Amino acid sequence: MSGHSKWSTIKRKKGAKDAERGRIFTRLIKEITVAARQGGGDESSNARLRTAIQAARAANMPSKNIENAIKKGTGELPGVTYDEVVYEGYGPGGVALYIEALTDNKNRTVAEIRHLLSKHGGSLGENGSVAWMFSKKGVVAIPAENTNEDDLMMIVLDAGAEDIEEEDETFLVKSEPSNLEAVKAALEENNVAYISAELTMEPQNTVAVEGKQAEQLLKLMDALEDQDDVQNIYSNFDIDDSVIEALNA
């Protein structure tokens, strides 16, 4: 599977667990705030804000929370100013890690991430050390039960989609970042519901990890997910599904 991202698959499967823990709300509020600060509070003219609001609604975030996050971003309400930062490093087995965070204290965040990496057999790298291993893509996830691949292809190709992959009863429509909004619009015009639509970093190649290193790596990924400032983690590892099921048993 081209550009396969194992962690994206794992996160999709455990999304309900994340929602129960409430972590997803914290992430989305930060993203909405930053998107509104950078591009204004009108979602019709701010694609990043529109995507964040759609994700918040999909997660059943109350409208008041969304409105307050927007107002904090535009300055209508007092709020914390978040900086966007990227950390690059390595995990067990030499896999690449590209970590996006929103923080109000860069020194605290880098110290905590360095500690988590070290604790779980990884290390923090220099800027640019792993970014070249990834390509930025737009990805829309669509339940396979909603449509068939041929019909879906007819809808999205003219909108700029590059590829469609099927994974765990879900179609993943991939495009260049600049075409993500057009792909979403085409799906909406044809009444095709989607689970998520986001910009992601796709690994160009994957690294197989197994045994003790696989267990250690998954613990590291979970620890990073639980770090308050981390928004997204991208990696190029590949772990056999049977290994994941055994570890989760």
Image: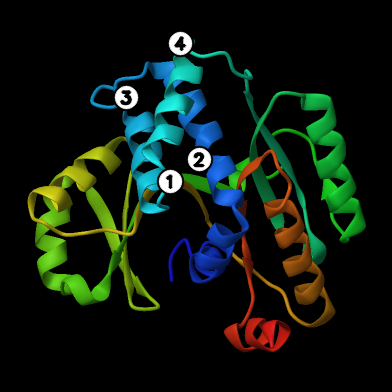
Left or right, 11 with reference to 32: right
Q: Looking at the picture, which amino acid does disc 3 mark?
A: Asn
Left or right, 105 with reference to 245: right
Residue designated by label 1? 61
Tell me the number on the disc at residue 168.
none
Could you tell me if residue 138 is visible in this image?
no
Element type where label 4 sits in the image: loop
Is there CB contact under 8 Å for labels 4 and 3? Answer: no
Could you tell me if residue 175 is visible in this image?
yes
Q: Quadrant where the N terminus lies?
A: bottom left
x and y, in percent, of residue 117 in the image: 84, 52
Residue designated by label 3? 46
Q: Looking at the picture, which amino acid does disc 4 mark?
A: Glu
Is there CB contact under 8 Å for labels 1 and 4? Answer: no
Marks 3/1: CA–CA distance? 20 Å
x and y, in percent, of residue 202 in the image: 50, 53
Residue designated by label 2? 28
Is there CB contact under 8 Å for labels 2 and 1? Answer: yes
Q: Looking at the picture, which amino acid does disc 1 mark?
A: Met
Element type where label 2 sits in the image: helix
Total label count?
4
Marks 4/2: CA–CA distance? 19 Å
Identify the mark nearer the N-term, 3 or 2.
Answer: 2
Tell me if mark 1 has few (under 14), some (14-19) or many (20+) residues whose alpha carbon lies within 10 angstroms of its own: some
Residue designated by label 4? 76
Identify the mark nearer the N-term, 3 or 1.
Answer: 3
Marks 1/4: CA–CA distance? 20 Å
